[in-house]
Amino acid sequence: MADTFLEQIRTGQAAQAWESTTAEFKSAEGREVFVQGLKKHPWLTKPLTFISTETVTIGNSPRSEYVYRAASGPGGVRLLAANERGTWRIDRMKFE
């Protein structure tokens, strides 16, 4: 799911990537803001290297964090995924 999300961003399908996020993500960051914000991180259009994943439970809700780094040069992203009504979706995105 995280790989697919990043692949959509990499291939210019940012609007589709936004559609795969949680309702909370969409509420906090509208589609246009999301798409425009990605332009500040041009390294997202290049392949990223998967670094790690960790799953924790917050309350009764499992969350998984996926960490990726730019294959060359600076840049990294952390994706927090949440299970929303039986489907894992990106809930937060943090750039490093």
Image (cartoon, grey):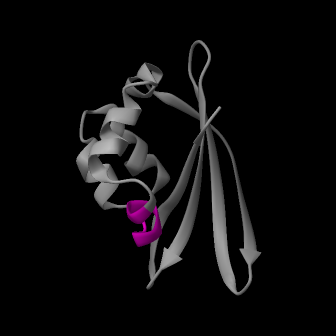
Foreground: 59 or 28? Answer: 28
Foreground: 15 or 64? Answer: 15
Q: Residue at x 36, y 40 (%)?
A: 7
Residue 22 image position (x, y, % from top left): 43, 68
Quadrant containing the N terminus in the rendered view: bottom left
- 11 magenta-colored: no
The answer to which quarter of the image holds residue 64 is bottom right
Residue 56 image position (x, y, % from top left): 75, 69
Furthest toward the top, the residue is 73
- 26 magenta-colored: yes
Q: Residue at x 74, y 83 (%)?
A: 59
Task: Identify whether 67 is placed above or below 43.
Answer: below
The answer to which quarter of the image holds residue 35 is top left
Residue 89 image position (x, y, % from top left): 45, 66
Is residue 65 visible in the rendered structure shown here?
yes
Q: Give the prevailing secondary structure in the magenta stretch.
A: helix
Q: How many marks?
A: 0
Q: Residue at x 41, y 53 (%)?
A: 29
Q: Which residues are magenta?
A: 21-27
Residue 13 image position (x, y, % from top left): 24, 41
Quadrant containing the C terminus in the rendered view: top right
Task: Identify whether 68 is placed above or below 46.
Answer: below
Q: Left or right of 24: which side holds 60?
A: right
